[in-house]
Amino acid sequence: MKKKLVKAIHDRVEKMNQAYVRGNASIFDEDEKKAIEQERKEMEKRGAEVVRSQATGDIISVRTHEQVTQVDYAILLERLIVQDEGSYMEERVFKRRATFTEGRLRADVRLLQGPVQDALNEGAGARDEQSQKHREYNRRDAVRYAERWWNDYNPAFKRFEDNCTNFISQCLYAGGAPMTAKGNTHHGWWYENSQSMSLSWSVAHSFRWYLSGAQKGLRGEEKQRASQLLPGDVICYDFDGSGRWDHTAIVVAKDLRNEPLVNAQTVNSRMRYWTYQNSPAYTPDIQYKFFRIVVD
């Protein structure tokens, strides 16, 4: 039975890989079909094309009850994208759940969130005093951290189910952004340990408003266009335009048309085009905030 499940998941991943190359979304549900079609149109506008794609799957867990078996698995999708005279590699990791009844695949859906992992070390607070001594923001160090940890989790920090803003805060901290005074979770931007941190450190909505409201230390200068951002800057996302900010990403590079490519977590992504039109969470009402990161 296990061998059959492994083969079924392998075959499914291969079909998805071909779908991502060819833009053929027929094997997906409606939300994913829409996302793939939106990305196809966006690629045409950008003058970009996926010339090679590789998807590999890894089974996370298998649960069986009577005749129904549920398989959670992760996919690493690597795509070589050519644009004009240049190219870059985009990578994404996302989780899916396949349901089999009597050995036959009945459903396969994308999971928008990953499992919660317990907090590990208590490590950031011990380094905070040192970080306060240098107040310049080193964009290269922030991007280097984003490249090192985009698909891994630094044990010095707590890991959340929605880890995107926690990850971005770590990137900015690695770049030299100073924490504020600690103690009040509703004020400032700081991390002490797995049980004590500001809301702005790990909650996308709070982080967005902290950046625009801060007067000193780490703050954000809002820009009108994504193309004005530099590596090390930040984009905040309100996917449905509700006024509640859902997601945060860091710019790590620019494409040949000067548009940002971002790294992010929750759906772990590297060198992803900034609009997120290829996400099932995307809606036509999406709102963005483009922040130039400043430390003074």
Image: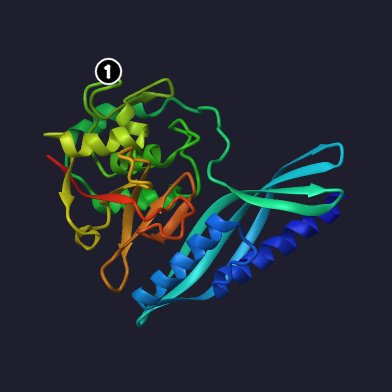
Identify the image's colour scheme: rainbow, by chain, secondary structure or one colour. Answer: rainbow
Q: Residue placed at 78% from the left, 58% from the top?
A: 8
Q: Position of residue 99 (x, y in %)?
A: 74, 47
Q: 124 or 219, which lies in front?
A: 219
Q: Quadrant of residue 224?
A: bottom left
Asked if residue 126 lies left or right of residue 130, the reply is right
Q: Residue placed at 34% from the left, 51% from the top?
A: 286
> Is 213 situated above or below 290?
above
Asked if residue 156 lies left or right of residue 179, the reply is right
Residue 24 in sight in this render? yes
Number of marks in picture: 1
Q: 269 or 49, which lies in front?
A: 49
Asked if residue 162 lies left or right of residue 244, the reply is right
Q: Position of residue 282 (x, y in %)?
A: 42, 53
Q: 62 or 35, which lies in front?
A: 35
Residue 126 in sight in this render? no
> Is 112 situated above or below 88?
above
Q: Position of residue 213 (x, y in %)?
A: 16, 34
Q: Position of residue 260 (x, y in %)?
A: 30, 61
Q: Residue placed at 87% from the left, 48% from the top?
A: 102
Name the amino acid, label 1: Asn
Classed neighbour count for the residue bearing mark 1: other residues with Cα under 10 Å, few (<14), some (14–19), many (≥20): few
- Disc 1 marks which residue? 184
